[in-house]
Image: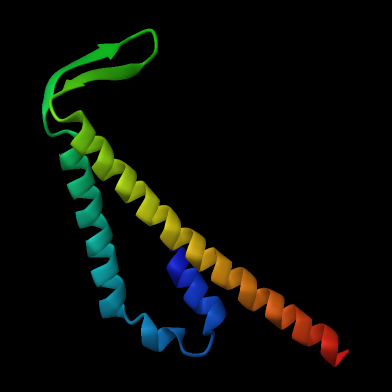
Amino acid sequence: MSVVKCTVIVRPLTHFTIFTDRVLRSVICAIWTWSLLVAVIANLGVIRARFNWTTMMVVMRRRHLALIHGFLVTGIVVSTLIIMTAYIKVFLVVRRQVREIRVRK
């Protein structure tokens, strides 16, 4: 979503040619597939799961803890970098436009 916002702000007149219906459907399918893959991998190797009524959390024992944590951390870092890059680009474009408006006055 942040990439779409970034594209609309950075390329206001051509974003419709970049994000066609086909591209948007493909992106939505990729996001759902990635989410499903993360959920499946996060639950691989679960030996035992127990719900704690006091903390309202599930406590799980796993086989391959390091592999699962590495995959999840990588997914979070990649997602965060994509979102941060999009928002930094928006910030830079807006700042440049504000400076141009101030110069014209």
Q: How many marks?
A: 0
In the image, residue 78 sits, relative to residue 89, either above or below, namely: above
The one of 56 and 101 positioned closer to us in this rendering:
101
What residue appears at the point 28 percent right and 77 percent down from the top-left corner? 23
The spot of residue 76 in percent (x, y) is 36, 47
Q: Quadrant of the C terminus?
A: bottom right
The spot of residue 33 in percent (x, y) is 19, 56
Quarter where residue 29 is shown: bottom left
Q: Quadrant of the N terminus?
A: bottom left
The spot of residue 59 in percent (x, y) is 26, 17
The one of 4 and 48 positioned closer to us in this rendering:
48
Residue at the outermost right position: 105
The one of 54 and 100 positioned closer to us in this rendering:
100
Query: 27 left or right of 56?
Result: left
What residue appears at the point 18 percent right and 48 percent down from the top-left corner? 37
Query: 64 left or right of 22?
Result: left
The spot of residue 49 in percent (x, y) is 18, 18
